[in-house]
Amino acid sequence: MDSFKLRKAEPKDVPDILRLIKELAKYEDMEDQVILTEKDLLEDGFGDHPFYHCLVAEDASEQSNNNNGPVVIGFAMYYFTYDPWIGKLLYLEDFFVMKEYRGFGIGSEILKLLSHTAVKSRCSSMHFIVAEGNQASIEFYKRRGAADLSLEEGWRLFKIDKSSLLKMSSGPEE
């Protein structure tokens, strides 16, 4: 591949972002869990107070089918959060490069740009989760200095789903 370009996502990229989210979910055998719509992504990422930020990678040599410009071949979705022990963090929520475009340094450049963003924003670190079975990604991050907190510090990830949130928010527990 001759050239690729990284840039901040724009509202016109929402269909491609959703397509890549679904490709990532399929790669992780979790395709049925993607319930977001283009409308959700547009409202949540491009309003006055976005819940997320997103970078996209384009293949500058290939045009998309809808003539909206170059083909979007990767993305990174992130947001800023705060840790009361160490301060500001950049949280990398999702990061994906299409299989046929891997091995060209696109992922490394996305991570470099995210690192620059974190440093520029005075973040103390970047956090993310990797599926346990995704050994290629685990090695990718470890080669770049990432520490596996689940092994080193024993942290566990928990989730409270929407039905439980609704139940808890509706009044005192009996």
Image: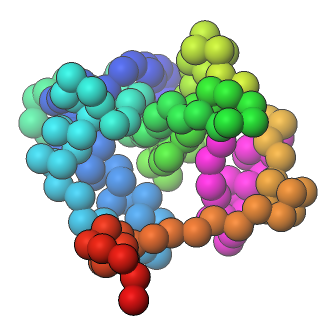
Answer with left or right where residue 153 lies relative to residue 116: right
Q: Nearer the viewer, residue 165 or 107?
A: 165
Residue 147 place in picture, x, y as percent = 83, 46
Residue 72 sits above or below residue 162 on the image: above
Q: Nearer the viewer, residue 60 or 95?
A: 95
- Give residue 23's quadrant in the image: bottom left
Look at the image and name its color scheme: rainbow
Residue 15 place in picture, x, y as percent = 19, 44
Q: Nearer the viewer, residue 172 or 43?
A: 172
Residue 166 place in picture, x, y as percent = 28, 72
Residue 115 sits above or below residue 173 on the image: above
Answer with left or right where residue 128 lies relative to residue 100: right
For image coordinates 70% across by 67% down, the residue present is 156
Residue 67 visible in the displayed image: yes
Residue 2 place in picture, x, y as percent = 49, 22
For image coordinates 68% across by 71% down, the residue present is 133
Answer with left or right where residue 89 lies relative to residue 19: right
